[in-house]
Image: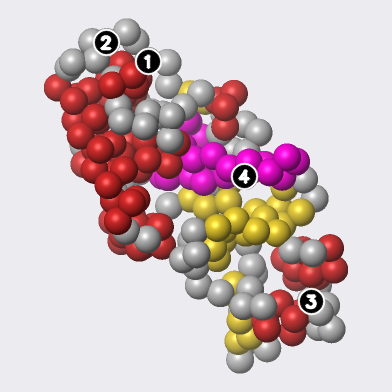
């Protein structure tokens, strides 16, 4: 007998607590201390059978007939680097592409459930290996510079989820591999979203994402 997370749930452990994202309900939540301890013990491979039925009843875990794979948090490299953009005109073709992408992402988030959007991003799948040779690095600098240049012109430019989905759409459309990362901080609770390639943050500053533990990476 084994256990697995219900579909649509992802988690991380930060500040000594397990924090969950239910993408279908578009909400973050934590567990009360007894459940939290039992869940963390399960993640460490030590199932507390007297408490786990309550987690099953709450719709957090599902019981499986066979021994299941370990329940693990999001697998994403810790961000260690960032791209340093150069000054560009906000009216370049690439910047206008980002503005349109952000408008489409904002409409998409208003009209489509987050779980559906996440599933669509997953279906796109990986494009290819991430490389940091000189030509590809130059492309990343060009893309990130255009994104930064049009910040003041992008609708709801301060909305990290909207801008990150737009950024991911543009870079994947250019044939470059990157991942959408959602992270949380426990004390006080806050959430953030960014796009990352390997251990490099693309559309944000390293200092802005460091306080957040990755919860979901697509």
* Residue drawn at 31 percent across, 30 percent down: 155
Q: Nearer the viewer, residue 78 or 106?
A: 106
Q: Nearer the viewer, residue 173 or 80?
A: 173
Q: Position of residue 2 (x, y in %)?
A: 66, 83
Secondary structure under tag 1 reads loop
For marks 1 and 2, give the CA distance: 9 Å
- The mark lying in front, picked from 3 and 2, is 2
Q: Residues within 10 Å of mark 4 (few under 14, many from 20)?
A: many
Side (left or right) of 8 relative to 35: left
Residue matched to label 2: 88
Q: Is residue 192 magenta?
A: yes
* Residue drawn at 34 percent across, 21 percent down: 151
Q: Residues within 10 Å of mark 3 (few under 14, many from 20)?
A: some
Q: Position of residue 71 (x, y in %)?
A: 64, 67
Q: Tell me which corner region of the image, top left, top right, bottom left or bottom right, holds residue 180.
A: top left
User: Which of marks 1 and 4 precedes in the sequence?
Assistant: 1
Q: Tell me which corner region of the image, top left, top right, bottom left or bottom right, holds residue 73.
A: bottom right
Residue matched to label 3: 47
Label at residue 184: 4
* Residue drawn at 80 percent across, 50 percent down: 16
**Magenta-highlighted residues:** 177-201
User: Which of marks 4 and 2 precedes in the sequence?
Assistant: 2
Q: Is residue 137 above or below residue 44?
A: above
For marks 4 and 1, give the CA distance: 26 Å
Which residue occupies the extreme bottom position in the image?
65
* Residue drawn at 32 percent across, 8 percent down: 87
**Cβ atoms at labels 1 and 2 below 8 Å apart:** yes
User: Which of marks 3 and 1 precedes in the sequence?
Assistant: 3
For marks 3 and 2, give the CA distance: 55 Å
User: Which of marks 2 and 3 precedes in the sequence?
Assistant: 3
Q: Is residue 199 above or below residue 55?
A: above
Q: Inspect this view and state whether residue 73 appears.
A: no
């Amino acid at each position: 007998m084994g256990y697995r997370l219900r579909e649509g749930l992802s988690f991380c452990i930060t500040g000594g607590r397990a924090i969950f994202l239910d993408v279908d309900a578009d909400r973050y939540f934590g567990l009360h201390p007894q459940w939290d301890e039992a869940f963390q013990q399960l993640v460490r491979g030590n199932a507390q059978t007297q408490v786990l039925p309550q987690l099953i009843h709450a719709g957090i875990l599902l019981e499986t007939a066979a021994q299941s794979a370990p329940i693990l948090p999001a697998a994403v490299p810790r961000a260690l680097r960032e791209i340093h953009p150069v000054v560009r005109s906000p009216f370049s073709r690439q910047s206008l592409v980002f503005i349109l992408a952000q408008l489409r992402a904002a409409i998409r988030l208003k009209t489509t459930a987050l779980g559906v959007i996440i599933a669509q991003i997953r279906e796109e799948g990986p494009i290819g290996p991430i490389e940091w040779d000189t030509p590809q690095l130059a492309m990343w600098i060009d893309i990130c510079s255009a994104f930064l240049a049009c910040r003041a012109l992008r609708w709801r430019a301060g909305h990290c989820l909207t801008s990150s989905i737009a950024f991911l759409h543009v870079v994947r459309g250019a044939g470059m591999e990157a991942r959408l990362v959602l992270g949380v901080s426990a004390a006080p609770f806050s959430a953030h979203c960014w796009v990352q390639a390997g251990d490099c943050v693309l559309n944000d500053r390293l200092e802005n994402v460091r306080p957040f533990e990755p919860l979901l990476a697509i």
